Amino acid sequence: MPDQIHLTVATVIHRDNRFLMVRENDDGREVINQPAGHVEPGESLLQAALRETLEETGWHVSLSGFLGIYTYRSPRNGATYYRLTFVAEPLERADPMQLDPDIIAAEWLDLESLKAESDKLRSPLVLSVIENFLNGPIYPLELIRELPGTTLP
């Protein structure tokens, strides 16, 4: 299979020593991940992070920082993922809404719980970005520059 490139975004949302995570179905296997997904054509990186978080968790969030760019090549499918990871503050839970079809549940988990279920983590990125969040640095959102008129309104 030829290598495929995927541009994705993810958010680390932290409150009361817990992280907002999703349990999702990945080809018949339950996995745990940050809210994350692909950037759609015409969408800004910030719009994509907000959209994916809402669609996968039902939470409105405010982006507060940028954690970094992560590259991961999946041994399962050979795809290369370029993941831009943001930090967000939870604002409010949306009115009851239908989450993405692959989402089993959105839940707040502490670091110990995530480590206890390390066999269910979607990829090594999941713990890596949390450790980066806890140890810093977190970069300002101004690091992301988008030219006017290049994204959807």
Image (cartoon, rainbow, N blue to C red):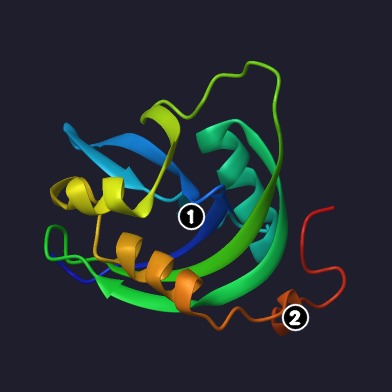
Which disc number belongs to residue 82?
none
Of the pair 22 and 74, the residue shown nearer to us:
22
Q: Of 58 and 150, which appears nearest the observer?
A: 58
Residue 145: which numbered mark, if any?
2
Up the image or down, 110 lies above or below 1; here it is above
Q: Is residue 86 visible?
A: yes
Work out how far the residue at label 1 is from the one at label 2, CA to CA, in angstroms: 19 Å
Q: Residue at x 40, y 27 (%)?
A: 105
Mark 1 or mark 2: name the one nearer the start of the chain: 1
Q: Can residue 44 be seen in the rendering of this structure?
A: no
Instruction: Say which element carries label 1.
Output: strand
Residue at image position (62%, 73%) is 66
Label 2: which secondary element: loop
State the residue at coordinates (33%, 60%): 126
Give the amino acid at mark 1: His
- Residue position for label 1: 38
Badge 1 local density, few (<14 within 10 Å), some, or many (20+)?
Answer: some
